[in-house]
Image (spheres, rainbow, N blue to C red):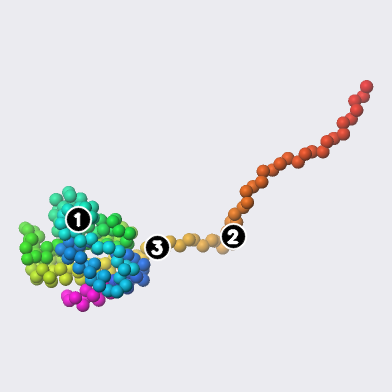
Amino acid sequence: MSGNDARALARSLLDLCRSRKLMIATAESCTGGLVAGALTDIPGSSDVIDRGFVTYSNAAKHDLLGVENATLNNFGAVSKETAIAMAVGALENADVDLAVSITGIAGPGGATPGKPVGLVHFAVAARDGRISHREQRFGAIGRSNVRQRSVVEALRMLVELARGPKPPAKVKPAPAAGVHKRVARSPRRVATKRPQPKRPVKPKKT
């Protein structure tokens, strides 16, 4: 995958989101803001991109995205659970419709048992409740290549999410046929009793 692939995907994503009036936030760890950079490198992206969170440390993931310390301690920063928590956290901390997260081991160091260099977890979340996770094992292809391929994968996931069900537009329902709009009435007047005519008093017989 080349930089041209990322640029083409970024342009397609922006056009799609623009047509559907969707806003995006990013939450990145191992890519250090490259996804947000690929999107904002294209003129006019400000009507789609709201913000990007670069949360490289566990403390940043917790402070900026609300990832629970228990999640980080039990599953690790590079995990499905953390990736999902990052995406949801980005969604909750920005006024957007879609969010993507990336957390992985770009190398050359950082590998642990069961988590080799090139392992990257991705997650996307939508305001309507849709959440998707993906795990990629790119292998020891070099730090730059892992990061670049991660950008492309994240953009692909965002495109897939953006093509999903479109949020219902907030349109006022039209009045039913034959039903007229109610006209505001003036305050109701208090009815007053009309004085009754006095009857002639008959003289009493003596």
Q: Is residue 96 left or right of residue 75?
A: right
> Which residue, given by chain and number where applicable, does mark 2 sit on?
180
x and y, in percent, of residue 140 in the image: 8, 68
* Eye-nearest disc, 1 or 3: 1
Q: How far is mark 3 from mark 2, CA to CA? A: 26 Å
Q: What amino acid does circle 1 point to?
A: Lys
Q: Residue reaching furthest right?
A: 206
Q: Can residue 153 be seen by looking at this rendering?
A: no
Using a 10 Å C-alpha cutoff, classify the residue at mark 2 as few (fewer than 14 neighbours), some (14 to 19) or many (20 or more): few
Contact flag, marks 3 and 2 (Cβ < 8 Å): no
Q: How far is mark 1 from mark 2, CA to CA? A: 55 Å
Local SS, label 3: loop
| Residues shaded magenta | 1-12
Residue drawn at x 77%, y 39% is 195
Can you tell which quarter of the image residue 82 is in? bottom left
Nearer to me, 136 or 108: 108
x and y, in percent, of residue 151 in the image: 20, 69
